[in-house]
Amino acid sequence: MQTEKELTEDLQRIVGTDNVSEATEKDAVEGVEPDFVVEPGSVEEISAVMKLAAREGLAVAPRGGGTKMHIGDPPRRLDLIVSTARMIEVLEHTPGDQIVRVEAGVKLEDLQENVSDSDQMLAIDPPESGATIGGIVAANSSGPRRYRYGTVRDLIIGITVVLHDGTVAKAGGKVVKNVAGYDLSKLFTGSLGTLGVIATANFRLHPRPGAARTVAVEVAEPQQAQAAAQAIVHSQVEATAVELHYGETEKQLTVLLESIPGGIDAKTEMASFLLKEFGEVRTLSNEESDRLGPLTPPEVADEVVLKIGAPPVDLAAVLESALGAAERKGLGHPRIMGHAGTGVTFVGFPEENEDGAAGFVEEMREIWVRRGGSVTLQRAPLTLKQRVSTWDNGGDYLGLVRRVKEKFDPRGGMNPGRFLGGN
Amino acid sequence: MERSRLIREMEGIVGAEGVVHEHEQLRTYECDGLMNYRVIPDLVVLPETGAHVQKVVKLCYDEGIPFVARGSGTGLSGGALPVESGVLIVLSRMRKILEVDIPNQRIVVEPGVVNMWVSQEVADKGYYYAPDPASQIVSSIGGNLAENSGGVHCLKYGFTTNHVMGAEVVLPDGSVTHIGGGKAPDAPGYDLLGAFVGSEGTLGIATRITLRLSRVPEAVHTLLAGFEDAEGAGGAVSGIIGEGIIPAAIEMMDRLTMEAVEEAVHPGLPDAGAVLVIELDGPEAEVEEQFGRVLEICEDNEATEIRVAEDDAERALFWKARKAAFGAMGRISNDYYVQDGVIPRTELPAVLARISELAGEYGLRVANVFHAGDGNLHPLVLYDNDTEGEAERAEKLAGEIVFTCLEHGGSLTGEHGIGEDKKKYMPKMFTDDDMNVMQLLRCAFDPHQIANPGKIFPTPRLCGERPGPFHMHPLQKAGIVEQF
Amino acid sequence: MTERNGRGEAGDDRYRATDATERRSDEGTAREDAMAGAIGAGSPEDVGQSTFAATTDSLQHTMGEDRPESGSYAFPAFDDHHPPEKAHIDECVHCGFCLPTCPTYVLFGEEMDSPRGRIYLMNKGLDEEPMNDEMVRHWDLCLGCMACVTACPSGVQYDKLIESTRQQVERRYERRADDKAFREMIFQFFPYPNRLRAVAAPMRLYQRFGVGDKLRRAGIMQRIPARMRAMEALLPDLPKEEQIPDLTGPVGEKRRRVGVLTGCVQRVFFSPVNAATVRVLAAEGCEVVAPKQGCCGALSTHAGREEESLDFARQTIETFEDLNLDNVVVNAAGCGSTMKEYGYLLRDDPEYAERAKAFSAKVRDVSEFLQELGPVAQRNPLPVTAAYHDACHLAHAQGVRQQPRQTLKQIPGMDVKEIREAEICCGSAGIYNMVEPEPAAELGERKANNILKTGAQMIVTSNPGCMLQIQASLKKMGQGGLPMAHPVEVLDASLRGEPVETLLDK
């Protein structure tokens, strides 16, 4: 076991003196403060750092923009943060093939800008700004456009990872269609840094649509919201996003439509026609849609935010159960928003009433896990997490999750304890 | 376990009619769609329910007997090739559609259900199942899952993995687990389903599969365009993609392929060096405008002839011309070797030129069928088995073509899988570390390595700890295998 | 749902699983007792309820030993007289496209009972394995429907392969005594209309006096072998025989001079079809010759009884060849298909080879012929919905699909319905529904269900075998009243201005 000084020196030898720093309390992950933060600049450096970490038995947390460090249960221990702040290169962008290869520290905004000059985009629109590709993949972040384009797992085509012991491995490639070997890109998507460090990732891109419009309908109650969403979902209009904003006063279903300029009017007309039986329909102006649209964060400071996954057709039931439970637990009218077309709903309420919050989480889990869904804490104070855990731990596949974790990270050095099942 | 006892035990699970053990009958199962490799299974078992599968696998696990799962046996990489002294578990009798849930746009099926049946089942409700491999009239959903099958509509709609929502899986130790959520999105945990799809039967057997249904598009427009050569066709493809249009399908065939297809199907193909079949679908107004642009782009790239499908029958004929391509090869050659490679689309002209060069060197003809949308190339190496040495040359040429694909930034396989056929090429695409890490996944699912052992990876690797006192595996003793 | 067994689907029991291949509700196949024939021979008991049990249990039917009779041992399983041809076998690339369309694969789900598997067995027979019980069993289970030929993208001529294989089996394989006796009995009767008529007459009395019911109530029915029951169940009510004249003049200008085949089962049980055929041909301007004639040999050909089939072929050629005919018109799909093959069948016979080719070139199915000729006679309306059933030997073997449909659609008021799973055989397949009653019954029921689902008022098909099979299946389901007719009977009613009732009261 090395001394701190020796460790610092070893790390500096790998990544350079400027790129090792002592951690401060703002580097803490859910209340656990590490000792060091390192910023490797290449895959080889990451590998060397991890070898060292393995040798010294250090617990490691990867970090990109830091926008998701609050997700998951508190780590059992944490010694080192491996930051991708220097892994910011766009390795390849081939517009003709519609693919891009980036290092994990590239911010999504920068990637989008980089590919936009060929009128292309990466069809992921998570709400956090400043998120890096590595973090987005690790947390499987998504936004409204997932309705049409899928989530990270549907867009990622290749990955390079570094395991806890420093092994570097790649999977996939830079072609969209590829079935050689196992699809580790998907395995690492959503793994929250518990299997290894994501060093680079490759994605398929989509053409940037020429025209966009948002249509909104006022819905008075949950059944209407569900019916309106279903009307769009089962139609042939091919919407890009179907979003719900269900607040105390403002209750709207918004539908984002994208097309070529010659086709946008017809689409807007069709969508409006489908929605009008449910309430007043408006086509939103740009400012309005910016305000309500994709960039509205599901998470707000000082709120507890739950993420509920349920069959899309149960939207009304989700809303009703949330409203009912919130009232019973003394939480008032929660702020609800969701991807109504895919069955993901976010419920937020102030964090002060912790007993109420805990009761709310338990009740929602009681209902929705039983029905094949999931209830996860998207954002919550530490004490609440310690009480009810981020994860509902439903499902009979926990054993398999554990076995995968044990194989990839036998020493338990990657974000130990943050993932479900205590992994 | 002694064979006759094993037969009795299996019969006890699936009934006498579910066990095949006579020699000639076993021989009919010795290969799948790829005839180059044959292994006679020790026993063939045909379960009818998930419970049967679970008990059969458990029995194999308890007795240390390797097993291979098989659907319709149409795979082209030898994925369902039986393993020596192993059991072949054939899922063709598990063919029920279990649940149709239109409101949630999903359907639950057993693994032996044929791909085409899924779409047929929901057609009258205005839905279909998007992944459409050319074998869809016979290949099973379970097989599609194992190989992550594609089809001609991949560019716009994705592959099997984008359309599977959940699965009940019998793991190699005989336990049953449910991965992927199935009904609700974003099930927490690792994307085990994503890792399972495309794992070629090495991680377990899916016994209930939840598939995503897609709404039939409002409008479909299809055209067939002839070009003087592949470059012209490729130019049109680039033009279309560059314009930001994503066709539902865009397929290319070269002159040799067209000759064969014309003989087999008589669609009346244009006299051209290369032909494109392009299909656009979606909302009517959008499609009409985009289609107009596509026509213009084809003309700009000097299409010699453009034919637009006037009705469903004509559209079906265009697709028949494309989908019959492999089978039609039998008309112009005694034998042929289907290769499956992927390249970045922009590399097509260079790769085709190289293939032409190689074909010349080897003295064989190569017909090319190309999923121009996603870069998946199917070179068909034509040869005559009865001519001395041609079969070997054909295989070597097919290998060279795959290396060419790799050299140009592509992959070993776009949709047929690695199976038995391509495991020798894996080291050309992946390092030892890459493969070792993939093996970690396999060990998590199948520590005893009894599920389809010997496929995908070139050298067998053991999985570390085994319960009980440590026994050195005979292969390990012989130094052939490493402890892993 | 109280168990947390994973994020599985809640409430799956809401939905009843349906067998995707069948797409009907899960009703059990109730096997009604059939009326038995008089002749019996020992045969194993009926199989159990499981579809798949048919394969092992009915293995009993075919057991025997390898025995060379003609030719010499050239291959492990075959002698050198027309073995299945290697060149044809090599055309199979093992793609499997034939599987979903093969009735036995649809029923059993096993590779050995698929065209791909059967070809594989033939290949093994050529290269390595001697003929044995299993191989023969799987070849016997083949219906010879040739749906696989239609489906195959590589153009494998499976029809030729199974024909030569069956000949080899008949020649070289010793069937079990009861099996042999049963088959012999069939071929003593079915190719000889007079004998068939002789047996059918007492059958009529038997049916009218409900002997079968009495036997059933007495509990004797169970003991009567399945094959007997199956055969008996197939035989319909015997109608009064309509005679057709030796020569019939054309109505109006003479366009062609044609001969007609009157058939065996057709002549005895469906003579109205023959009468309608002659009338329709005459109405369309044909001079129609109906010579005294025997069997065309189709059943024998399809069963692999080579010598017998060649004798019938020669006889048939001799019957028609000197009559100065433009065409020979056939209203039975199975017969037409074999007659078109005479050129191939008699290729080794120097005396008949050329004559056979010339003869085959003149053979037409009646619907095919009528469309070729082009309609002239006035069609009167027949407002009725009819489900058209494709006989395998017409659709798959002769490629005649559009012409019968066109013939029907040219009648004003006719609504022709398509039957789901049209390409799958009804189970008649020559003598199949008599020698393999269990799979035949399954297929028959399936076809009957698909027909009923069309909601049509009547069934139209071009083959007497199919008629017998479908009728028997419908009867078992309590739907025996659904009227059936040949396309030419429908056309005949239209040409004669008959009301729809004429067809629906049949």
Image (spheres, coloured by chain):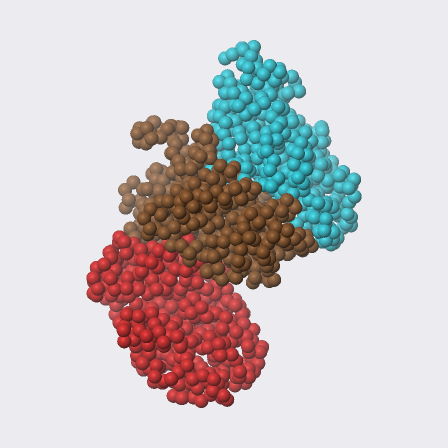
Residue at image location 30% in from the left, 64% down from the top:
C164
- Decide which of C255, A288 is in the foreground and name it: C255
Residue in the foreground of this view, choosing between B328 and A335: B328
Q: Note the chain letter of the cyan one.
A: A
Q: Quick check: A175 above or below A4?
A: below
**Chain identifier matching the brown colour in the rendered picture:** B
Chain identity for the colour red used in the image: C
Res. C97 in view:
no
Residue B128 spot, x, y in % from top left: 57, 54
Give me the residue at 52% from left, 42% from top: B350
Q: Locate residue C392: give its quadrant.
A: bottom left
Rendered image quadrant of residue C168: bottom left
Q: Is residue B365 visible?
A: yes
What x and y, as percent, mark residue C473? 43, 69
Compared with residue A67, is residue C260 higher up or lower down, i.e. above or below?
below
| Residue C376 coordinates in the image, percent (x, y) | 53, 82
C83 left or right of B270?
left
